[in-house]
Amino acid sequence: MQALVCQPAAAPALFSAEGMVGVVFLLTVALVVTGALIAVNAQRLVRAVAGLAICFTGLAGVYYFLLSPFLAMMQMLIYVGAVSILIAFGIMMATPEEQQTADMQHSSILAGPLAFSVGAFIFAALTVLGLKTQWQVFPRQGSFDIKAVGMSLLTTHSLVFELISIVLLLAIIGALVLAQRGRN
């Protein structure tokens, strides 16, 4: 008996269906990275929340590409729809502070280069790990209709359902703390 050896096919053309899926996936990942950079580097809190919402939206797209449309929908509803909006409402309820951002001093000159080098090291390590790993495709098991997922969330996986409610509760508390701190 001969062993079945699968040889990788040639790379798909850019204007084929597979090539366009790859381009759209890369655009989705770029949306995640762009939103994260906006959230981290924004000078104003409102822009940081907008970057966070962009990052969460891109992450929902990544979940969709991972063949999990229900998880993508929950990402949009919970994080983009609830958490980001709650933080934005907390910012709007707070009174603006009169401090100038130019007066802020960084604690160390080495903080930026050190953070960049640690991030670059982690990125390189994960890239090497991703390229060296032999990825296996697992067949789907069971039906993934919305009714079955809902019943599973309320019976078997009720802890996950409760953790979602705790995330929303923490977002509400965080928005209230932001609003209260801005009013003092």
Image (cartoon, rainbow, N blue to C red):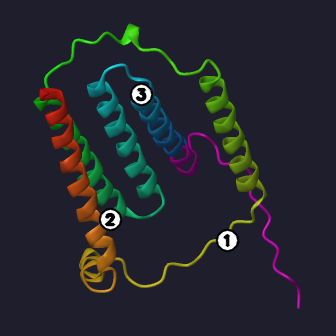
**Secondary structure under the numbered disc 2 in the rendered image:** helix
| Label 2 to label 3: alpha-carbon separation | 27 Å
Q: Is residue 116 visible?
A: yes
Say which residue appears at 45% left-offset and 35% top-offset. Answer: 36
Residue under circle 1?
136
| Label 1 to label 3: alpha-carbon separation | 35 Å
Give the class, few, some or many, for how many residues have Cα within 10 Å of label 2's Cα (few <14, many ≥20): some
Please, what is the three-letter code of the amino acid marked with disc 3?
Ile
Query: Residue 45: percent from the left, percent from the top?
Result: 29, 26
In front: 57, or 90?
90
Q: Is residue 119 left or right of residue 17?
A: right
Q: Quadrant of residue 58?
A: top left
Q: Counting residues from the N terminus, which is met first, the one under dot 1 or under dot 2?
A: 2
Please, what is the three-letter code of the amino acid marked with disc 1?
Gln
Q: Nearer the viewer, mark 2 or mark 3?
A: 3
In front: 135, or 13?
135
Position of the C terminus by quadrant:
top left
Give the class, few, some or many, for how many residues have Cα within 10 Å of label 3's Cα (few <14, many ≥20): some
The magenta span reads 1-22
Circle on res. 70: 2
Say which residue appears at 26% left-offset and 27% top-offset. Answer: 46
Q: Residue furthest front?
A: 184
Q: Are marks 1 and 2 in contact (CB under 8 Å)?
A: no
Q: Nearer the viewer, mark 1 or mark 3?
A: 3
| Label 1 to label 2: alpha-carbon separation | 23 Å
Residue under circle 3?
38
Position of the N terminus by quadrant:
bottom right
Please, what is the three-letter code of the amino acid marked with disc 2?
Phe
Query: For the stretch drawn in magenta, what is the main secondary structure?
Result: loop
Say if the magenta span includes residue 8: yes
Query: Residue 31: percent from the left, percent from the top?
Result: 44, 36
In front: 178, or 50?
178
